[in-house]
Image (cartoon, rainbow, N blue to C red):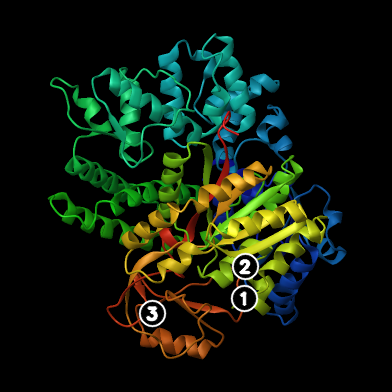
Amino acid sequence: MSLWTERILSHFTADLTRLWVACDPDDVLLDEKLLTELRDRGFELMLYEDPFAFRAEYEERYRAAWDRGAPGPAPSLVVHLRGADANALPWDIVHHSRVVRLSLADLFPKLAYSTVQQVEPEHLAGLFHAHQTELQNVRGENESKDFILEHVYQLAPRSIRNPVDFWRELLRLHFANRSLPLLFAQHAASIVHAKRLFTDQPVFTWLASKNALLRVVQDAWSRYLKTMGLDGLRTGEPPPPDYVSKIEIPFGHSDVQALVDSMLLDGSLHPLAVHSVPAGMPSWIRVGIVQDRAALQALVLQGIDGLIETTPSTASSHKDWSEFAKRYSEILARTHGLLGKEGSEHLPVIRERIKTLQAQSDEHLQDWVAARHYADLILQPVTKGPVMVHHVPRFLRHRRSAGETKVALLVFDGLALDQWVQIRERLIATTKRFAFDEGTAFAWLPTVTSVSRQALFSGLKPREFDDSIDRTDKEESLWKTFWQNEGVSSNEVMYRRALRQVDQLEVLEADLNDRRPKVVGLVIDEVDDRLHKERSKKDVAMWIDNWLSTGFVDRLLSLLLDKGYHIYLTADHGNIESTGVGRPNQGVIAETRGERVRVYRSESLLADSAAAYPTTVRLDIAGLPANFMPLFASGRTAFVPEGEQVVVHGGVSVEELIVPFVKVSYVIGTE
C-alpha cells in the first residue's frame, strides 16, 4: 500500500461508527484506488449534491435498514461533501456521524496549493511520495510547477536544449497518455519559448492535447516521407489538410523513430499508402508505409496483437479502459475495409485475432464491472470531462460558466467508437475545416436507449427517473428541467429528435433563428435505426459511408458553429455483432430492440430465465431502481432466434459501453 493510501485511509476505522462525513473540497477521496480500498474495508461512499436525491437514497437504502436493526448495503457509509463546512449537511447526518476533513493544502504543505489542485487524482499518490521523500523546503508557485512536471509527468522542460530533445519528450509524454493540464502546459511552453525554440508555434496546445499533436505529427510524417522519395496517401483519407502547421520533426533520430513506430502500431498515427518503395529504404521506415493491401493487413494484425497484449484488467482504472477503447476503435475501423475481401493470407488470421481480442476484452470488462469499479464512475468529478453520460449536462453547465454561453449537445443514437472514427475520417477528408478534441464517456448499463439516453439528457441516475425508465418520451422535459434548475429559461432551451436528413436542417435553422436558444440538445438517430437492419458492422459501416455522402453531418456542424454554438458530440451507447441464442419467454425488455439484455421487475422471473439460459450474466448495477433487474446475454450472443446474426446493443462490451465524447470546433483560420 502506498504512503498516500495509508495517509488518507488512516482516518477511517470501521469499528468507530457506521456513518461518516468526509469534508473534501478537492475530491481527494474520489480516486478509484482509494474507493476500492474503502470498499474492501467495508465502506460505501455517497455523494451529497442534490439534497432531495440524497435524502431519498439515504432513507431507502440505509436509514430504513438501520432502523430495522439490519446492517444495510455496507457496514459503514461515508457521506462525501465537496466543501469544508460540515454544517452544509442536514443536522441529523452531522449529529450522528464522525467528520473527517481532507484538503490538498494540508496534505501537500510544501507545494503551492493552486498547482497541486490541477493534478489529476490518479497522480496524487506519486506526488505525495515525492513530496515526502524529495522536498526539504517550501516551494513557490513556479518551483512547484517544475517539481510536479518532473515527478508526476516525467517532463523537465528546463533540460530541453534543442528540437530533438523537445520532440522526444513531447512524443514520449503523449505515448504514455500524460497530456498536461492547462496550468502545466502553459508553464512548460513558456520555458520552451524562452529557449528560443518554436517561438511562433502553439507549443502549449501540443503539450495539452494529444489530438492536436497527432495532426501535426501525421502531416510532418507525410512530408518527411516525400523527402525520402515516397509519395502517397494516408490510409483511409486523402492528402493531409492544408491547415496543419508545416512543422519539421526529426524523424531521423533513433529516439523519435522508436516512439513513432509504437504510435503507428497502436493506431494513433496512420501509415502512408505508397505505390512503390525505392531501393535502399531504411528498414525502420517500413512500419509507417504500406505498399499494398497485404502490407496494410499485416499492420492491422500487428495492432490487434498489441491490443490483446495490453487489454486492461480488473484492477485497471476507467482511464485505462478509455484509452484502450480509443486504440481498439481505430484498429476496428481499419478492419471494416479489409474483412470480407479475399486474396490475402492475413484475412483469416485477422478474423480469428479480432474474435480473440473481443472475447478477451469483453471478459475483462465484465469482470471489471462485477468488481464494482463501474459503480465508482458515478462518483467522479465532471469539471474536466464527463466520465459517464449522465455527467454530460453538468459538464456543459461548467463550460457555460467558463464562457461557452451557447452550447449544443449532439447525441448520435447508437454510435460506437469505431463508427465515430469513420465519421471523423470522412469529415477530415471532405471539409478540412473541423478540429476534434476527442474523449470518451461510459454509457449506462444496460446499454439501451431508454436507460442511457434518458440519463444523458436528464443528468440523473436511472433510479431517479424510475417512472419513465422503459420509454423515452420524457427526454425533452427532463432536459429542460435540468437547465431551468440552472437558471436557464424554458424558451432558451431546445430539444429535437429523429434528425437524419439534409432537408430537416432548413427547419432546424429556422427554429434556431426564431427562438435563439442558449442550450440545444439534438438526437441524430440514423445509425441506431440502421444497425438493427444489418447483419454485420461492416455493412453498417458501408451504410454510414453512404449517409455521410449526403452532407448531413458536416452541414449540421457548420450550421451550429456558424451560429456561435460550442458543439459537444456523444452517443448514448454503441453496438456489436452478435449471434442469437433464442428468446426467453419471460421478462419485460427495457427497449424493444435491446436484444442483449432482458430486464425483470420480479426476482422469481429473473431466476427462472437465468436457470433456463445458464450462460447469461447477472450484474448488480449501482444507480438502477431496486426492482429493475437486468439479465445480460453473455459474450457476443443475443436474445434473438438461435443462430441469427444481428447488430445490437444492451450488454457489456467495449463497443457498447464506451462511447465518444468529442468537442467539435473550426480549425483556427477556417471559421
Q: Check disc 3 and report the residue beneath it.
A: 639
Give the residue type at disc 2: Gln
Residue 525 vs residue 620, the one in the foreground:
525
Query: Residue 238: where, in percent of width, then height?
Result: 36, 37
The Cα–Cα distance between marks 2 and 1, rounded to whole angstroms, is: 8 Å
Q: Check disc 1 and report the residue beneath it.
A: 469
Tell me which label, 2 or 1, sits earlier in the chain.
2
Tell me which label, 1 or 3, sits earlier in the chain.
1
Q: Are marks 2 and 1 in contact (CB under 8 Å)?
A: yes
Q: Check disc 2 and report the residue beneath it.
A: 454
Going by the image, does 254 lie left or right of 24? left
Name the image quarter holding the C terminus.
Answer: top right
Query: Residue 187: where, in percent of width, then height?
Result: 62, 22
Going by the image, does 512 lie left or right of 624? right
Residue 454 vs residue 161, the one in the foreground:
454
For label 1, the crowd category at 10 Å Cα-Cα, with few meaning under 14, some 14 to 19 and many 20 or more, is: many
Query: Residue 449: where, in percent of width, then height?
Result: 54, 69
Q: Which quadrant of the figure has residue 585? A: bottom left
Disc 3, SS: loop
Give the residue type at disc 3: Phe
Tell me which label, 3 or 2, sits earlier in the chain.
2
Q: From what the image shows, is residue 290 above or below residue 636?
A: above
The structure residue drawn at horizontal position 34% and vertical position 29%, both measured from the top left corner, is 260
Going by the image, does 34 lie left or right of 280? right
Disc 1, SS: loop
Asked if residue 603 shows in the view, the reply is: yes
Q: From what the image shows, is residue 265 above or below residue 95?
A: above
The Cα–Cα distance between marks 1 and 3, rounded to whole angstroms, is: 20 Å
